[in-house]
Image (cartoon, grey):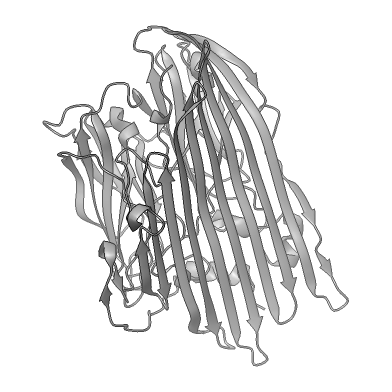
Amino acid sequence: MTQIGMLGRGLCGLGLVVVLSGTAQAAPAAAGFTIGSPNVAVADPAVPRPPGRACTVELFNDVSFDDFGTRPYSYAPPAGCGTHWKKVVLEADFSVTAGRQYDRTATLWLGGVNLYFGTTQEPSAAVSPQWHVERDLTDYSALLRQAGQGQAIIGNLVNSTYTGVIHGSARLVFYPGGGQGDVPDAVYPLGADPVGNTTVLNSGSDQLARTLTLPRNVERAYLDVFTQSQGGDEFWYTCVPDAYAAQTFECGGGNFREAEVSIDGQPAGVAPVMPWIYTGGIDPYLWRPTPGVRTLNFTPYRVDLTPFAGLLSDGAPHQVALSVAGAQGYFSATAALLVYRDPQAAQVTGRIVRNTLAGQPPTPTIGSTLATDANGNLSGDITTRLSRQFTIEGYADTSRGRVRSTVTQTVGFDDTQSFLIDPSTYDQHSVQLTRVDSLSARQRGPLVETYTQHVRYPLDLDYRQVTAADGSLSAATTVRQGQESDTARGLAGIPLYSTRLSNQVEAADTLQFDASGAFTGHTGQQNTQHYRFEDNLGSCYEASVASTGGLLSGYTQGQGCPAGRNRLSWFSRPDGSPDSREHAPL
């Protein structure tokens, strides 16, 4: 009997080509979408822009990606646009020709720093998809004030079998008028490549690490983290502990993954791992025309390292490192250290006074109710649980006095995998929740500034394979996937700014195969995405897309917002990307 470990991964690995059926009459819709179109349709918002003129710097234009080589480009800051900007936005457009092709990882770089990280949409024999992505790079302004070398990397195999050629263009758009102190003073890439590339982490002991000697007046520090599952780890969320791998026909190694940050070997923070499902994942029909949550455009998770500011300012070299607990070959990782400096002090001193993350290894608790009956049928659950609460506290003596910084987090992982396996049925139902609840507090005298964040990555995945009496087979998949985030900033007990984000995708499809294993078609394809963002200053964004049979069947926007219209303040970040300006200097 073919199991999920063979079928789900096999479809992606073989680059299954299917023709989108149906030629529904096209009707115009909002936001450039066309009802009845098979082209990519997402509900994600664009990056909001400030009013006024903008300056554009082209990075590359209509470049083809048909091999595994890099595509280098040169960058120079925009002329006549100042050196401080209210906002900087990366815009990129991609397409892939119709035919057979894998989903591919795409990255853009400058001076070793990642500008964009995502994956591509798979084509079909009849559809050449196109898509647009944006990323707010305002916090990387220090990097963009100087000329440098960059490169685009989309490794892509093109031959007589895999025919899809990827094309891409990218540019940076600058909005002048920002003030000094609004953004980090320096950006340091982790990794050895001076132009930029990811680092492979094959196991939990592998590290992406860099030793840095920083300026002696660091007062705040943050690490932007990307950890993307690839290779044998692409479907990590379906894996089971080694002890149960054979009887469940699943990958071993367990399904707990978490990014670990350290400074000089001392635990310094954690970052959750998003269970991305790429557009060839499990069943390619699920993601046409709408991919999974943030599949085409990742956002980094920002780890607050400010309690270490005094230590990092001592003039000595310090190693900043990133690893992925549970990695099984492999994760692709990159990170960037963002640093604020005290403009009035040549030397900041300080130290860590408490770190309860040390001594709390990321070791989950495993439970199982799996049992085999008298007929050899297997049923039951495997549970994986981990919850850690920790506090990291340090102080820095700045030009304004002593500032105490405390980061308190509760990080959790809850997963239940339910199995039913008998001669005709293989059913695996995974319900998973990755969560982080964090509080960053900075205190100078009686004045306290706080920032809270609650992040959730829910995943509900059911795969049911049934073999009929004639040997034919059906494989039904349903997926519910989400990104949820609530943030709040306060000063001296006064609420200043808060946001709420919900991004939900639901998809279903059933693949069909004859007794020889040949693919014969699919039924029941449907997909919906609902996106909502709001803040306490009047921003409100809502959009939903729906598809049936691989064609866009519905689009709405503004529902539930005042006057039924979307409105976003230019400084808001409705994609949930981090913004260090959430923290004001004390």
The residue lying at 73 percent from left, 72 percent from top is 420
Judged from this view, the residue extending furthest toward the bottom is 470
Question: Viewer-proximal residue, 499 or 152?
Answer: 499
Percent coordinates x, y for residue 67 in the rendering = 32, 58
The residue lying at 54 percent from left, 78 percent from top is 510
Question: Viewer-proximal residue, 506 or 169?
Answer: 506
Percent coordinates x, y for residue 316 in the rendering = 48, 13
The residue lying at 67 percent from left, 56 percent from top is 252
Instruction: Point out the image quarter for the C terminus.
Output: top left
Question: Is residue 47 rendered to the left or right of residue 413?
Answer: left
Q: Is residue 546 above or below residue 397?
A: below
Number of callouts in the render? Answer: 0
Q: Is residue 131 above or below residue 508?
A: above
Percent coordinates x, y for residue 389 in the rendering = 67, 33
Q: Is residue 572 above or below residue 62?
A: above
The answer to which image quadrant residue 538 occupies is top left
